[in-house]
Image (cartoon, grey):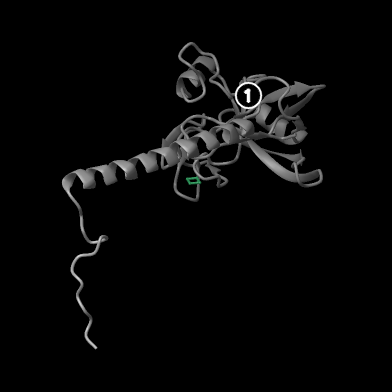
Amino acid sequence: MSKEHHGPSAYDDPGTPEEISRRQFMANATLTLSGIIGVTLAIPIVGSLLPQAGAGAGTWSPLDANEWKQLQSSTDKPVKIEFTLTYKDAYLPKGQTAESVWGIKVKDLEAFKKARPDIYLPNGTVKAFGPDIVTMGFVVFSPICPHLGCRFNYDDSAGKFMCPCHGSQFDGQGAHLAGPAPRGLDPLPLREQNGQAEVTWIRYQSTTPDRIVISYTS
Ligand code: FES
């Protein structure tokens, strides 16, 4: 049995130019409206993830004393410093895990500030959600690549931090040199307490040029 042809249906008929433009308008309006609803819902969710910046956020973990001494006696070379991170997730019991940070000695603070405009404003103050990072003449960086979260390493012969995942490179002060990372290495708060160096562990949003705090250790 051959198929009958019934001529153009209502679905096939493109309609008059006025009808076409009215339909297009309605389609655009629907897309715009769903976009507005999406953004409106997203803002409170993202906002609720952002902790208050400043003192008192997060807890402090002591760094390995020997590795801290090694950093103190180092000249230019970054030093990987281990420590035990105690964490408390909202849904899981308190736990501990081995972690590390990269420490560098800052010999010239003004040069360091100039090398890291992603951390410092032109007047020398730290940008929002950045800790006051140079403490006792040292800075520590999170070992997590700001691109997509891999662990990078320091290549002695090249004098650079290199990420094995997608090839991002950073100089000895953590400034972004090459690859897809959107910013330089992320600083972590550092302090001295009773002769011991301590850090606060912060997770920053990956892939964004601005440094957005996702969580502090708590
Ligand atoms: S995660 Fe480091 S370059 Fe992609």
Q: Residue at x 73, y 22 (%)?
A: 56
Q: Which residue is outermost to the bottom?
A: 1
Residue drawn at point x = 20 percent, y = 52 percent: 15
When asked about the image quadrant of residue 149, the answer is: top right
Q: Nearer the viewer, residue 18 or 107?
A: 18
Q: Quadrant of residue 140?
A: top right
- Identified by mark 1, the residue type is Phe
50 w.r.t. 110: above or below = below
* Nearer the observer, 17 or 217: 17
**Left or right of residue 153, residue 189 in this image:** right
Task: Decide if residue 115 is in sight here.
Answer: yes
Is 211 on the left or on the right of 94, as rendered? left
State the residue in front, 183 or 29.
29
- Left or right relative to 111: residue 71: right
On-image quarter of the N terminus: bottom left
Q: In the displayed structure, does residue 164 sit left or right of residue 178?
A: right
Residue 204 position (above or below residue 153) = above
Q: Residue at left 75%, top 30%?
A: 59
Quadrant of the rendered structure where residue 18 is? Answer: top left
What residue lies at 45% left-to-right and 49% top-to-bottom?
Answer: 166
Residue under circle 1?
138
Question: Split into 4 quadrants, where in the image is the C terminus?
Answer: top right
Residue 187 at what x, y percent from top left?
Answer: 59, 29
Q: How many marks?
A: 1
Q: Is residue 80 visible?
A: no
**Disc 1 crowd, CA 10 A, few/some/many (<14, 14-19, 20+):** some
Q: Secondary structure at mark 1?
A: strand
Residue 134 coordinates in the image, percent (x, y): 61, 20
Residue 5: image location, x then y, percent: 19, 75
